[in-house]
Image: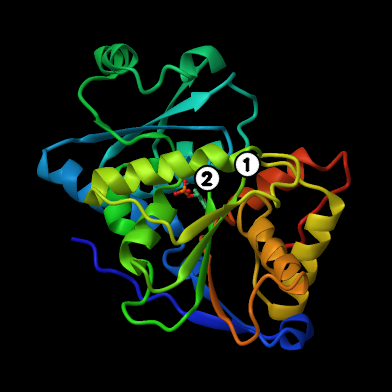
Amino acid sequence: MIANPAPAITSITHPQLDASNLSLSLLRLDEVHPLISGNKWYKLKYNLIKAREEGHRTLLTFGGAFSNHIYATAAAGKEFGFRTVGVIRGEKNDPFNPTLQFAVDQGMQLVYVSREDYRKKNSPAFQDWLTSQLGQCYVIPEGGSNALAVMGCTEILPHEHSYQYIASCVGTGGTLAGLLESNQDQATVLGFAALKGGSFLYEEVNQLTRVYSKKTYQNYQIVEDYHFGGYARANVELVDFINTFKREHGIQLDPIYTGKMLYGIFDMASAGYFPSGSHILAVHSGGLQGIRGFNERYRKKKLRIIVN
Ligand SMILES: *Cc1c(COP(=O)(O)O)cnc(C)c1O
């Protein structure tokens, strides 16, 4: 049903990397699909297959109003012939932000729930209530992280590689879990937390790999120093970094995930974290749809990601 893409690997040259004798490459998941972008393609793949096998007509999932996962699920539903329902945290805003406008344009039905109810989203009672309102649905958790998502994410890395470090962004941990499962003990895996207080993510990731393979891994680290104030927070330093990176390398980063990770990798490189001669592969997990909404939200603070 769904053939895997073969993402390109782009090598990044920069005097700061040369100075520490490091090689850095980007695995370009941002290019795997024009709409089902980045890691979300891999996270959805086996969920779509399962939903179809089970005869479901509707996918139901959860997210914030700017969510890459909501965007990708809406596009995947349209492409593969499912109805989609997005349960959105918080109040309806008029007009729609660009993410929700896109979702609605793809045919997604939006259901708004209060922040308080949203916290109950994984409870059976809440899900029963949803299906009583909406009919039978295939439910994908927030961020798409379940065992099938982990399975999809085991297909991200090249089979054979000689990198000492794999770097990836972490939101809910599903992507990192899949990377760990396919990497086994080849490289050290660094997960850059997009949110503040990311130490709970070890338990999330361990739980996901335990469910998937009954294993937990030791050869990974959650890097907690580059959240820039918290999830979707940003400052001028981050935005300048993203804009400079675009100008120097021609590659667009997003401000929620990949910009923070690349900033972190460069910062750790200059602090001497990586031994001389290390080869680093950083997963560009996409997320570029979020830039328009980011620029709108931060207009008053004069933060602006330059696109094109
Ligand atoms: C969703 C997302 C992530 C986080 O993935 P998890 O599997 O939830 O950790 C990372 N990067 C981008 C660009 C994303 O859209």
Residue type marked 1: Leu
Q: Say left or right for 70 vs 192.
A: left
Q: CA distance from mark 2 to mark 1?
A: 7 Å
Q: Quadrant of residue 206?
A: top left
Residue in the foreground of this view, choosing between 281 and 289: 281
Q: Residue at x 25, y 33 (%)?
A: 58
Q: Are marks 2 and 1 in contact (CB under 8 Å)?
A: yes
Residue 245 x, y percent position in the rendering:
74, 71
Q: Is residue 56 left or right of residue 221?
A: left
Q: Amino acid at mark 2?
A: Gly
**Disc 2 residue: CB within 8 Å of ligand 1:** yes
The N terminus appears in which quarter of the rendering? Answer: bottom left
Categorize mark 2 by other alpha carbons within 10 Å: few (<14), some (14-19), many (20+).
some
Mark 2 lies on residue: 171
Q: What residue sits right under mark 1 in the picture?
A: 195
**Residue 268 image position (x, y, % from top left):** 71, 67
For label 1, the SS is loop
116 to 24, vertically: above or below = above
Residue visible at 75% across and 38% down in the picture: 297
